[in-house]
Amino acid sequence: MGQNPDIAKEFELNPVVVTGTGTHQRLKNTTAPVAVVTANEIKRAGITDFQQAMTMMVPSLSFNPTSMGAYLTMNGLSNKYVLILVNGHKLIGDVSNNIDLDRIDMSRIKRIEVLNGAASSLYGSDAIAGVINIITNDPQDEITLTSSTKYSGKGQLTQSVNLDIAKGKIGSSTAFKHAQADNWQNSPYETVTAKDGTTSLRETVYPMSFGFHSNMLNQKFTLQATEKLSFYASGNYYWKLTDRPPKTNDTNGGFNYDIHHESWRFEAGGLYRINSKNSIKLDLTADDFQQRHKFITDYQDYSIGDYSLTKKQKFYNAELRGIFHFTTNSNTVFGLNAREDKLKATSGDVDASAYTLSAYAQHEMKWKAFKATFGARYDYHELAGSHFSPKATLMYTTGGLNLRATYAHGFISPQLSELYYKYYNDNAGRKPTVSIGNKDLKPGKSNYFSLNAEYRTNRYSIAVTGYLNYLSDMITRRLYPINDEIKDWSKKNLQLTQEQIDRLEDYNLYVNFDKAIIRGIQVDASANLFPGFVVTGNYSYTYSRGRLDGVWQNIERSIRHTGTVAVNYSHSWGYYRLNVNLNGRLQSKRYFPGEDDAPGYGIWNINTRHTFDHIRHIQIEPSIGIDNIFNKKDVRPKGVNYALLSPGRMLTIGLNIKFN
């Protein structure tokens, strides 16, 4: 039968983590505070979607809902300042500047580690707001077959099948996932603004959330060649197609095409253990993400069923890392890294690439009750030049109390689209815009300071973190009035007609933001009150302000207050185990300078899981729950900034079956 929930929670309060320091350590021993969401917590909540898991369990993360995908923000900063890793390797692939989170297979997750603040000394560019590292399982049992199914309203279905085989020195993990959902609306109306500034409502078929269906296949092989030498190789194929309403003469809000995503990802590497404490590891990654239009109406030169490539992203990475224990109370990490980014985008007329070469080192040492980590990284970016990123942390431990202080430098190189973009968008006949890249952009930079106090026992934990993040040269897209120079440029580079040029009123140019300051406090608490009953609560306050041309304003999409609560009860009677999980998120309004802010909301979910272990080698777990218990939803017309993307209260049912 399953592990005693009380013992399991004690272990979950102090899991092994790797993201903060690059070495495997118990959570209470790491000098960098890390938030961890375990597979058991995700399973108890009945969650099969990465976005929902982060929304309901990590208050420093939020998602600004759009019909094209969720726009991730972390500690007041947008998704481009957040580095998403899978087993320590960068994940690419964006849709309208939103990372395609459906590429993450929740059925394989062991835990999710969230590191707040700048982390460029270990991870290089993009790690300014923080790092999300998704750790997956390797095969452990001789043979295990699992099937997981979840269905809820609006045609939302997730089906995963995993086969793990571990025989002698060889291991194999095979995973298949299918997901789908229908289009849906909360309001059949959209707001229309006339030239004189007046507004009116009209009916539309434009969905609040686009329907889709997707398939993903993962395969990983492991080989323990000798006692000291091991290898792995993995491949991932992902395919997704939206199901949008077609455009007709009788309706507003339809589309001429669906959006098709396809990606291939390959990883390989080896680990050589010099001895029990020293090792060298090599990792190779190749990631290819493509976006196409699949036409669902006859449009211009395209017929129904035709495809048109719109974006191709490629990422190649090689990293050599050594971990050494030169003394009993220290460990040292050395690393070399080479990567290349490529982007081809027909909509922005971009066909460019850039390489980055890096070297880094980190030393951690312990002396009596003190533990300190010092690290530095040197990066050379082909287009943005050289950058140096230091980091220093200090931890003092007495009993169950940890006190930590951190300084970390972060940077982000300009994206290829920001450097080379040139794009005209007629906005479906409304006010057109021109967007222009800027080859003179400087890397964005940050200096991050934090103080953390944490108290842990086997049954309780509470942590308070205060931080300051000073940013300069942030890259943003700014609107300027149109002028003759830009009109001439647009005519030459975008082949616009005189009629299109005459309609232009302004243009977007990528520029470096003056500066920004983010102040925040986070409180995380967990208690195993009595056997089988666990309560966790998390609160995040973020004050995000940026200055442009001497004017301070709230950073777009930032939120001041967020909180998450989870209450879990588990008990066994013979071969039957019941698990009840109540999960909630409370969030204040989201800021949109110059526009209407998105209102705050509170949402609560409940899930019950029923485990039957009476059949040998078979475990059956049906589940039933309610998402959005209090039926919270945004019923305003299309055209506003939504806070919550939910169709309202929904019944969820699921079934997990495990054979071993």
Image: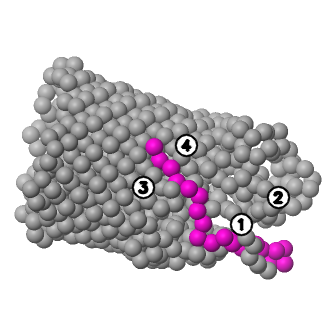
State yes or no: discs 1 and 2 in contact (Cβ < 8 Å): no
Instruction: Judge by depth and name the residue closer to the eye, 159 or 24.
Output: 159
Q: Residue at label 1?
A: 204
The image's mark for residue 151 is: 3
**SS at badge 1:** loop
The furthest residue to the right? 498
The furthest residue to the front? 615
Within 10 angstroms of label 4, few (less than 14), some, or many (20 or more) residues? many
User: Mark 3: which amino acid?
Assistant: Tyr
Q: Position of residue 405 (x, y in %)?
A: 25, 62
The image's mark for residue 240 is: 4
User: Mark 1: which amino acid?
Assistant: Thr
Q: CA distance from mark 4 to mark 1?
A: 25 Å
Instruction: Judge by depth and name the residue closer to the eye, 14 or 247.
Output: 247
Q: Is residue 182 found inside the magenta-colored segment of the image? A: yes
**SS at badge 2:** loop
Q: Residue at label 2?
A: 249
The furthest residue to the top? 225
| Front disc: 1 or 3 | 3
The vertical placement of 39 against 562, above or below, is above
Q: CA distance from mark 4 to mark 3?
A: 19 Å
